[in-house]
Image (cartoon, rainbow, N blue to C red):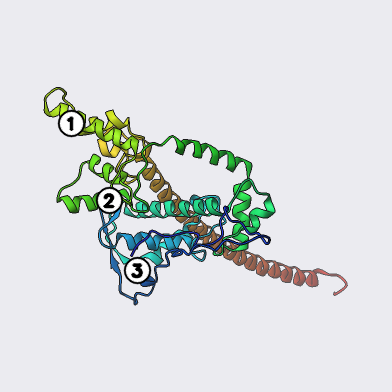
Amino acid sequence: MDDDSSEDGGETNIGSEHNDTGPQKQKKKTRGPTRCIRIIGLEEGNKLSVEFDEDHQPVGENATSFVAFLRVTVRNRSCCPLQVKEWKDISRDAIDHMWGIKMKKFTFELPMGKTESIIGHMNALYRDYRHKLKRNYFNKKNNYESRLKNKPKRVSISDWKYLVNLWSDQPFQERSLINKRNRSKHSMPPYTGTKSLARLRYQVKKRNGATPWRVDVWIESCKRKKGNALDSDSQIALSQLDQLKKQRVEGHISINDEEMFEKVLGPEKNCYVRAYGPGKGVTEYFGIKPTKAKLTPQVEASRREAKEQVEEAKKEANERVHQITKDVEKKIAEMNKKWKEKFQMYLLEGNLHFHETCPMKK
């Protein structure tokens, strides 16, 4: 099963908005978004086994189906809401619900850290889905009414209105512009499509029979789908790497593979290792002191654990307060009853004494 899919399903996009006048161009037929019919149709109890690498990234035979099912899940409005600013605003109940749906169709071991890795993958697929909706259907040059009219078929009116309002917000547009400028600085982008670098590395390892060096995966990622030609920047970088290798063999320089890679392509970023992907940061890959790339998942996990402990403590405290309140009310009721009985007894004794000493009665 292939998880390469068209997110717009052949619908109208910003390049061909609704127009009631003039000739209409015939829409190009596309395969539409992945629906995972085969997986959804699995009988109860039948599950697909998924293999993960050491960095908790799905690889192997059913990795494509697993990622495709995650993609379908985050696009399903009954599971994953659109009316949130970003993934972190989705409730934990909704995430647990999506997790439960996935576990009904797939089986895999869950060592420490893999759960957060899978949820992080869902986060990336969710952002990608919203990005494609914005790219294909939202045109900031149009007026507000035109933006609302250009609604995707598979998005409800209320969801689309929320997204249009969010994307029309000035702070959001400013942040989007900054991100666009940052992306434009990236050189030699990979051409792997929806295939992760982890799966590409797994395929190279399976083909060569040994764990590939990063440059081997990098070269594979630079290959286009139609043909094996590299872009000009990648060709220059590859030529420089070959030259450094040759100089090392001839004894002119003493440099290892990682140093060569950094010399040609520059230093790595904090949260991303070239030809490795998001599965492992620079700190984890090179074994340097901890950085934000390594500490963030640990901090988030600790924060969630602390929050759960606080909620549990609150629950226990509320239960104790409730029980103490009931005990106090019971004791007050018992004391009131005793005082009432004593008061009535005093009244009775006083009344008898009054009759005994009253002169008129005598």
Left or right, 52 with reference to 32? left
- Label 1 or label 3, whichever comes before in sequence order: 3
Query: x, y (%) of residue 312?
Result: 45, 56
Disc marking residue 105 = 3
Q: Residue at x 78, y 72 (%)?
A: 356
Q: Nearer the viewer, residue 300 or 128?
A: 128
Seen in the picture, residue 279 relative to 290 is either above or below; the reply is: below
Three-letter amino acid code at disc 1? Lys
Give the structural element (helix, strand or loop) at label 1.
Answer: helix
Seen in the picture, residue 26 relative to 171 is either above or below; the reply is: below
Residue 83 visible here: yes
From the image, which quarter does the C terminus lie in? Answer: bottom right
The residue at the far right in this view is: 360
- Label 3 or label 2, whichever comes before in sequence order: 3
Q: Which residue is drawn at 52% across and 50% down?
A: 86
The residue at the far bottom in this view is: 43
Seen in the picture, residue 16 relative to 29 is either above or below; the reply is: above
Asked where in the image residue 278 lies, by quadrant, the reply is: top left
Query: x, y (%) of residue 98?
Result: 43, 63
Q: Residues within 10 Å of mark 2 (few under 14, many from 20)?
A: some
The residue at the far left in this view is: 250
Q: Nearer the viewer, residue 229 or 217?
A: 229
From the image, which quarter does the N terminus lie in? Answer: bottom left
Left or right, 274 with reference to 321? left
The residue at the far front in this view is: 23
Residue on which disc 2 sits: 200
Distance CA(mark 1)–CA(mark 3): 47 Å
Disc marking residue 245 = 1
